[in-house]
Amino acid sequence: RTVYVNGEYLPEHEAKVSIFDRAFLMADGVYEVTSVLDGKLIDFDGHAKRLQRSLDELDMKSPVTMDELLEIHRELVRVNEIDEGLVYLQVTRGAPADRDFVFPDPETTEPTLVLFTQSKPGLADSPAAKRGMKVISIEDQRWGRRDIKTVQLLYPSMGKMMAKKAGADDAWMVEDGFVTEGTSNNAYIIKGNTIITRALSNDILHGITRAAVLRFAREAQMQVEERNYTIDEAKEADEAFITSASTFVMPVIEIDGTPVGEGTPGPRAARLREIYLEESRKAAI
Ligand code: PMP
């Protein structure tokens, strides 16, 4: 695989980042994951805009322009011959001369930019989407700025492990009695013709897939309610699903061992997945 590090395209085993890099020492970095279908990027603009917002919130600069970033994405997709898969991008505050809690002077410390690809044949035609996912609920013990897409992913990773140990596929996190989101996705329930999902705030990541799916849902004459809901309300819903750049729309069929609806992927979630894939392929660049 060819990867990108700070201006260079290299074989992955030759790519190196300093041990003083603040992402390594302090999780001081942000990332984006953009999916690839038919060799094209899905919703690149959305991901580029959110990256810029994450950087701004943390007083960081991008080492390249968003146009250059698009070119790097395209070049990696081309050289690695990605038909279906992902492009992972990470910007860190860089590697100052020594470890210090204080942010280094941006005049003397360059940010680090790393990109790599992952080939995932069958991403769109996924067996998991036909089967549906099982989730458990866990306390949300992350920090308070979940709207910033940082590489500080230890709690979500622990959540996935808790799910795995319980024989489930993922965990929905709960704060003050209400669902925030999945470990790496936004969470939704459907009651009748209405999609219910938590409103945007600092409590959740502002999903790029979320924005698109809610737009398509409204266009398909579904109602959208952005509000809090509990795990009990979710268990009683007709359908449930998640969204993310790497899973698109994925039905949820069980919560804490209780089947949602019929306990099989629901028709509305399946339809939203179809619409999302169809529209995103058309708009891919
Ligand atoms: N919430 C969290 C916590 C995530 O990690 C992700 C995936 N990065 C999402 C939501 C979904 O965001 P997107 O649709 O932009 O991938």
Image (cartoon, helix red, strand yellow):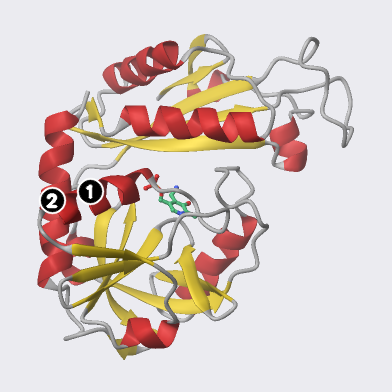
Q: Is residue 136 above or below residue 117?
A: below
The secondary structure type at the circle numbered 2 is: helix
Residue under numbered circle 1: 215
- Give the class, few, some or many, for how many residues have Cα within 10 Å of label 2's Cα (few <14, many ≥20): few
Between the C-alphas of marks 1 and 2, the distance is: 6 Å
Mark 1 falls on what kind of element? helix
Find residue 268 and report its horizontal and vertical position in percent.
13, 67
**Marks 1 and 2 in Cβ contact (< 8 Å):** yes
Q: Position of residue 215 (x, y in %)?
A: 23, 48
In this rendering, would 157 be left or right of 262?
Answer: right
Residue picked out by circle 2: 219
Q: Which quadrant would residue 29 be assigned to in this image?
A: top right
Q: Position of residue 253 (x, y in %)?
A: 26, 78
Task: State whether label 1 is within 8 Å of ligand 1.
Answer: no
Residue 119 vs residue 195, the one in the foreground: 195
- Assess disc 1: are there few (<14), some (14-19) or many (≥20) residues with their C-alpha within 10 Å of its C-alpha: some
| Residue 168 seen in the figure | yes
Q: Which amino acid does the dot numbered 2 rest on?
A: Glu
Where residue 232 sits, quadrant-wise, is bottom left
Which residue: 33% across, 51% down? 210
Q: Quadrant of residue 132?
A: bottom left
Residue 246 in view here:
no
Residue type pointed to by label 1: Arg
Viewer-nearest residue: 17 or 33: 33
